[in-house]
Image (cartoon, rainbow, N blue to C red):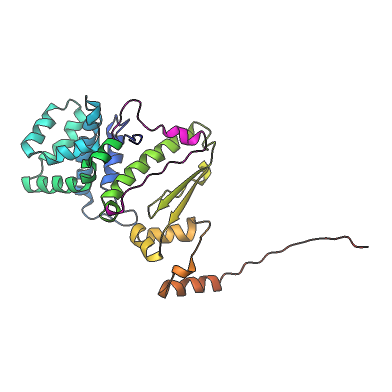
Amino acid sequence: NTLRLPLLDGIDIFDDALMVAVAIIPKPEHEEERGGYYRDSERSVLAALILGTANHPVQELRNLNEVFRLARLPVKELGDWFNRQENPQIKAELKSLWDMNDSDIAKFLNGLKSKLQIFNNPEVSRATTGMAGENLDLECLFQESSVLYIGIENQYIEDGRGKILLALIKRRLDAAIHRYANAHGGVLPIHLSYVLDEFTYPMTWGSMNVAFHLGVQTDGLGELVYGKTGWAAITSSNTRNKLIFPRGITGEEAEKYARLLGDTTVSTLSVGSSRSK
């Protein structure tokens, strides 16, 4: 019975659909992608499926559960869906799917089903499908003091399915922040704090009056989530303040922070005056 956040709302052109596809099939941030040409083809096919679904004549089917359903169709039935599409770009991008052999098509669709499985959950499907009068107005967050809490069961985060859902939710939030800030001279009227538990974040939003708070148990876990290069970039050049709980640090990490604290000197110069008789 929560408010809804439609993830496919406002997707009218292929480029918008492709952004969603890239969130579902992400590109590596700090290294070259193996088989990049084929992965880009997969993203284009997925974007075509998303674009067609986002503009479905039935509002209740404009969701990623419908894309999941398409991925489960036999190839012939998916071909029938393809033939019914009127958008020429959808037909052009999906053509690359039919250029694959049957085994590659099956491999792609199986991978897609695995990534989108969480949207087959009725509660997730409802929460991410638009419905007039029940949708969350994100701009309210930037007009008055508000709290938006998004929780995803840990089991879905651990097996990877929840990270895709979280990435897509964050994409909607980021787009709303950009849109509202741009309409107000590039800065949000009310300061916004993002609290992210072991999840990636953009590094260039300080000028928009947006702060990010990351909670990570250890450096090793940070590297696992963000990659070694990405974690180093975050902690060495983009983090203004670090709050460390030393009782939870052991082994090599304890030695690292002991050296860091030992090599750090804080000097404070103060000038004062007083009157005395």
Tell me the residue at 51%/70% (across/down): 260
User: 219 above or below 127?
Assistant: below
User: 77 above or below 103?
Assistant: above
- Report x, y in % for residue 130: 30, 30
Q: Is residue 134 magenta?
A: yes
In the image, farthest residue toward the front: 1
Tell me the residue at 27%/33% (across/down): 14
- Report x, y in % for residue 141: 47, 36
User: 89 above or below 250?
Assistant: above
Magenta span main SS: loop
Q: Which residues are magenta?
A: 129-155
Tell me the residue at 41%/75% (across/down): 251
Q: Is residue 35 magenta?
A: no
Tell me the residue at 49%/64% (across/down): 244
**Position of the C terminus by quadrant:** bottom right
**Position of the N terminus by quadrant:** top left
User: 154 above or below 261?
Assistant: above
Residue closer to the observer: 168 or 249:
249
Residue closer to the observer: 83 or 141:
141
Is residue 128 visible to the viewer in this orientation of the structure? no
Q: Could you tell whether 240 is left or right of 129 in the image? A: right
- Report x, y in % for residue 49: 20, 36
- Report x, y in % for residue 236: 47, 61
Is residue 269 visible to the viewer in this orientation of the structure? yes
